[in-house]
Amino acid sequence: MVRRICERTVPPGGPLTRRQKKAAREAIIRLLCRASGNVPELAEHLGLDEKLIDQLLQELVRVGRVRRNSDGGFALHDPLSKWWESKGS
């Protein structure tokens, strides 16, 4: 039981395990599904360091799951929604 609690708790400024990184990426994607955001907002909501959130967002941008807006924020990259909207017109 104690081990499970330790896995779910992230020490401030500490490194993340692979499982914690995956969970943080999924949480970022779920937040960006609802609305676009920037690094400080996401860091505050998730309770993680801004440097760590920025690193995870850069990985998601590189993979193509997230795109950077012109205002410096981030949004979910969803090419199917654009295709679907153009088909409806």
Image (tube, grey):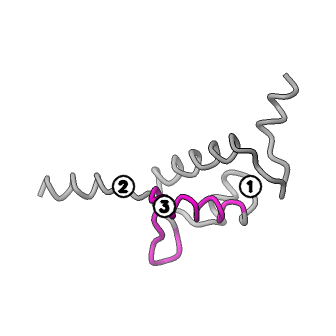
- Quickly name the residue at label 2: 78
- Quickly name the residue at label 3: 36
Give me the C-alpha separation between circle 3 and circle 1: 18 Å
In the picture, measured across the screen, residue 27 lies left or right of residue 18, that is left
The quadrant holding residue 48 is: bottom right
The quadrant holding residue 89 is: bottom left
| Residue at 71% from the left image edge and 60% from the top image edge | 52
Give me the C-alpha separation between circle 2 and circle 1: 25 Å
Q: Which residues are magenta?
A: 52-73
Q: Position of residue 27 (x, y in %)?
A: 59, 46
**Residue 45 is one of the magenta-drawn residues:** no
Tags 2 and 1 touching, CB below 8 Å: no
| Residue at 48% from the left image edge and 70% from the top image edge | 68
**In front: label 2 or label 1:** 2
Mark positioned earlier in the residue sequence (2 or 1): 1
Tags 3 and 2 touching, CB below 8 Å: no
- Quickly name the residue at label 1: 48
Mark positioned earlier in the residue sequence (3 or 1): 3
In the picture, measured across the screen, residue 17 lies left or right of residue 71, that is right
**In front: label 3 or label 1:** 1
Q: Position of residue 79 (x, y in %)?
A: 31, 57
**Residue 64 is one of the magenta-drawn residues:** yes
Amino acid found under the numbered disc labelled 2: Asp
Give me the C-alpha separation between circle 3 and circle 2: 12 Å
**In front: label 3 or label 2:** 2
In the picture, measured across the screen, residue 79 lies left or right of residue 14, that is left
| Residue at 76% from the left image edge and 37% from the top image edge | 8
